[in-house]
Amino acid sequence: MGQVRNSTDLAGGSVQPISRSNDCGTRVFTPKEAAQQEEQFRTLAQSKGVTSQVRLLRSQPFVVPLYYHVVYESETFAGGYLTDTQIHAAVSLLNEGFSTSGMEFRLDGIQRHHNPTWFRLSEPNSDGWPHEWQMKTQTKIGGMDTLNVWTNGMNLAAGYARYPWDNLNGAVDGVVMKYDVIPGNGNQIRSGKSLTHEVGHWAGLYHTFDGGCTGNGDFVADTAAQGTATDFNGCHPRDTCPGQPGEDPVENFMDYSSDQCRNHFTWGQIDRMWTTFSTYRV
């Protein structure tokens, strides 16, 4: 449950800076906007008879096609160039994080794009949104049921995602990651699980701290209320909503705690991802 610093929407909206205490650039919804969106989501899900569709999808192996787009300015790691081995390690860690969900991400292709402009400017706190549009519309593969991940050199966030209901009819759907937030980078704070976090957004999850200690929070019943994001320095227990049941879910993928802490989605989050996926992505 909680608040992300706002990335702007291509259709309009303001830009707010992203601090180092906030490493996710996914768009923030105000509580009012989130409640309105949730009502639309639930109405659409009901009209589509999603409950029975979810049962059918979960009764068999469910594979999501995945395409990786490496945007680089030079053929060096510092220039954003990732090897196939590094990408396979990132996908393996992603699937490890989703292992209890029943969803598997199958790497169907790796594309490399030498484009210094896209590498530098496709970030949520710059004039890079036109470049995001170019980058995605020129390179995106598949439809809403396919996950596209782009890596580039953004320096104000570890990554950002487009919610399934907030991506201009799929034109800018997908996840964008900073190229060096990968397994084996020697950083215990951010060693690759940020991709799992952003794909959680792509699948319809909010932060566990969204909404703070009041209201509907992240619209998931089994994540404890959380007043503020966990500082990603360590895994210390905390309770920012002492008047509410449970302590802060510092081990949840949708918090900001260190990667050494983050290790699960709740069953409620998994149910929400299936419902969201069935409503918007299949």
Image (tube, grey):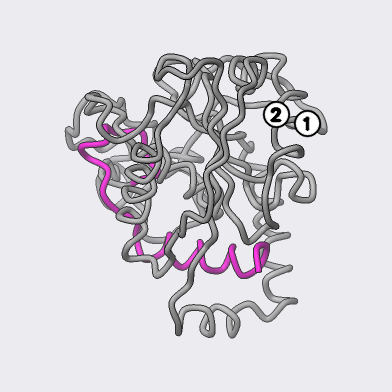
Residue occupying the point 52% across, 31% down = 151
In front of the other: 83 or 92: 83
| Mark 2 and mark 1 residues within 8 Å of each other at the beta carbon | yes
Q: Is residue 3 above or below residue 169?
A: above
Magenta highlight range: 253-282
Q: Quadrant of the C terminus?
A: bottom right
Residue 201: percent from the left, percent from the top? 52, 46
Q: Is residue 280 above or below residue 225?
A: below
Say whether residue 67 is magenta. no
**Is 274 on the left or on the right of 87, as rendered?**
right
Q: Name the outermost residue toward the right.
A: 11
Mark 1 residue element: loop
Q: Which mark is residue 206?
A: none
Which of disc 1 and disc 2 is earlier in sequence?
1
Amino acid type of the residue tagged 1 in the rendering: Leu
In front of the other: 127 or 273: 127
Q: Quadrant of the N terminus?
A: top left
Amino acid type of the residue tagged 2 in the rendering: Glu
Corner quadrant of residue 255: top left
Q: Which residue is mark 2?
A: 132
In front of the other: 116 or 266: 116
Residue occupying the point 57% across, 14% down = 17
